[in-house]
Image (spheres, rainbow, N blue to C red):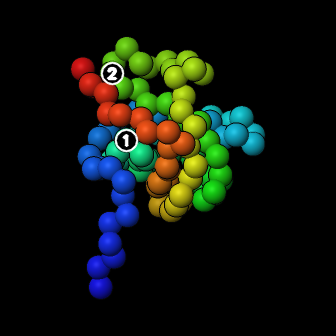
Amino acid sequence: MQHPDRRQDPRFTLTRPVKLQCHGSGRYYGGQTHNYSASGALLVVDAPPRLLAGQRVRLGIAWNQRDTLLRSDQLVEATIIRNLAVDGRQHIAVQFEQRVPLRATA
């Protein structure tokens, strides 16, 4: 049985470095995007399972080579929708608080 697609925006395969900050602890985690839409993203985070569905986070995406160090004001608010631990990494689906249009990755 197929489930209806509940996505609000088209999703694209996109592999870019990300920085994720937990609201509660302030702790940062590194990882990368797996896919992306203006309303959310699927991330692969290099951390043991500590992040939970419903948890609020701030997320920064390195859109290009110059974005290797992301400033705090470049992070966007998001909520973790799903989390699956696989081989010591977390596959995390996040929904952005506000739409974040795809940017050029040059």
Residue 77, given in percent of the width and then of the height, sits at 57, 37
Label 1 is placed on what type of residue?
Ala
Q: Nearer the viewer, residue 80 or 45?
A: 80
Where disc 1 sits, the SS reads: loop
Label 2 is placed on what type of residue?
Asn
Q: Nearer the viewer, residue 106 or 84?
A: 106
Q: Earlier in the sequence, mark 2 or mark 1?
A: 1
Which is in the foreground here, disc 2 or disc 1? Answer: 1
- From the viewer's perspective, is residue 37 above or below residue 87? above
Residue 47, given in percent of the width and then of the height, sits at 57, 47
Disc number for residue 38: 1
- The residue positioned 49% from the left and 49% from the top of the image is 95
Residue, far bottom: 1
Residue, far top: 66
- The residue positioned 41% from the left and 35% from the top of the image is 100
Q: Is residue 63 left or right of residue 43?
A: left
Disc number for residue 91: none
Circle 2/circle 1 CB separation < 8 Å: no
Q: Which residue is mark 2?
A: 64
Is the residue marked by circle 1 packed among few (<14), some (14-19), or many (20+) residues within 10 Å?
some
- From the viewer's perspective, is residue 43 above or below residue 30? below
Where disc 2 sits, the SS reads: loop
For marks 2 and 1, give the CA distance. 17 Å
Q: Nearer the viewer, residue 101 or 52?
A: 101
Q: Is residue 105 left or right of residue 18?
A: left
